[in-house]
Image (spheres, coloured by chain):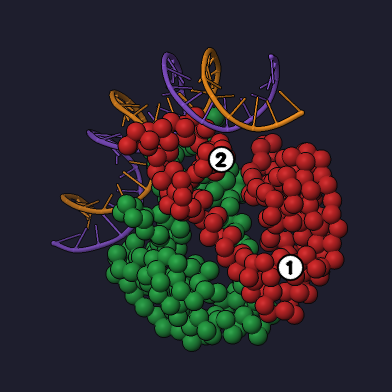
Chain colours: A red, B green, C purple, D orange
Amino acid sequence: MINIMLNQIHALPHTRQVFRKGQYLFHQGDPVVSMFLIEAGEARLLRRQRNGGAIVLQRASPGSFLAEASLFTAHYHCDATATTRVSARLISRLAMRKLFENDPVFAEAWASHLADEVRSARLRAEILALKTVAERLGAWIAAKGEFPPKGTWKTVAQEIGTSPESLYREIARRRLGK
Amino acid sequence: MINIMLNQIHALPHTRQVFRKGQYLFHQGDPVVSMFLIEAGEARLLRRQRNGGAIVLQRASPGSFLAEASLFTAHYHCDATATTRVSARLISRLAMRKLFENDPVFAEAWASHLADEVRSARLRAEILALKTVAERLGAWIAAKGEFPPKGTWKTVAQEIGTSPESLYREIARRRLGK
DNA sequence: CGTCCGCTTGACTCAGATCAAACTTGGTGG
DNA sequence: CCACCAAGTTTGATCTGAGTCAAGCGGACG
């Protein structure tokens, strides 16, 4: 289902573009002409505040779209920057909209994709709302269905919003039968 | 736009149903026959684990849909329970799908609604990933554009994943010019 | 063989959770 | 009008989970 969607999208007119680390993919206020499908690296969607700080709204890694909401808005509401060197596929927004309007199968696949994103973002939020590392790891395992394989621990620590050291300790604790 | 969608949805065949606190709205595995629009109270979507614990996947408050993803799946993947007394509007899933398939305007509105949900869920996750209460409150204010009005503080504390006391202290700290 | 990176463990420190106790406020009913 | 109750707010005291800094270990890879 999701693959059908990706196939259809890949068939659309597009270009590839590479961004240097720190470079902007687009700015708030820019007209939306393309959808960004990240192929390598990491890009962030963020809103700058007057005090200089910035809130991150999305972290897009390879395989994910950068600002899904931009399909239906004329201008961007946020900035997007590359946190690493990024390679992205730029797909014509107009072509994607036409596809959405004329092909109910694609429309359903897209809505379904969005619903999945909602689910996973909410799950992440609920996990992060837990107070202890033990609970967060427990929830992560319950959600994924498996114990995180060695080699991914550092990444998992980031996902559940804790320091690598704390996660290592929690894992060690579990090994000792709690 | 969102209002158009709600109007269209309200015009669909539906029934209203009240659930007692603790009652299940549906169980994992049940066939999806209706979409739930919460009108009063709070309902949670959750996945139970073998060890007895449960992970919350969504917290639906008045005005929001309970399991958006269920529009496109035949069976529920989770349980839903009422955390308070809940009044919900049950909308025929079939009717909503037909509307989605035949009315491009509705389809767009629905996808747009989902994109918004994605945005806000991701924002919540990013806020919860911040380490200090000061940063979380700062991000919350930046996102909402206003200081939380008195009377809502306890709720805000919950939203940003902290205890009411800690939030009160942080607010007091801000009053003293940082 | 050296270097990098992920992992491991120890020691220290501190933000914030928790418990507890007052005090404000609004609403309710007598 | 007042007694009274419930909720939200304040503030204090205490305790603990986990972030941080630091030092050491082991495997992968050029």
Residue placed at 55% from the left, 30% from the top? B177
Task: Examine the rendered structure and indicate whether residue A157 appears above or below residue A145.
Answer: above
Q: Residue A112: x percent and y percent?
A: 60, 69
Residue placed at 73% from the left, 52% from the top? A38
Q: Residue A19: x percent and y percent?
A: 82, 44
Q: Secondary structure at mark 1?
A: helix
Say which chain tag 2 marks.
A
Quarter placement of the C terminus of chain B? top right
Q: Secondary structure at mark 2?
A: loop
Compared across the picture, whether B78 is left or right of A8 comes to left
Whether residue B1 is visible to the viewer of this picture, yes or no, is: no
Distance, label 2 to label 1, CA atoms, is 29 Å
Compared across the picture, whether D20 is left or right of B14 comes to right
Q: Residue B56: x percent and y percent?
A: 42, 56
Q: How many marks?
A: 2
Q: Amino acid at mark 2?
A: Thr
Compared across the picture, whether B102 is left or right of B41 comes to right
Quarter placement of the N terminus of chain B? bottom right
Q: Residue A142: x percent and y percent?
A: 42, 52
Q: Nearer the viewer, residue B24 or A138?
A: A138
| Mark seen at residue A152 | 2
Q: Amino acid at mark 1?
A: Asn
Q: Nearer the viewer, residue B36 or B84?
A: B36
Whether labels 2 and 1 belong to a single chain: the reply is yes
User: According to the image, label 1 marks what residue?
Assistant: A7
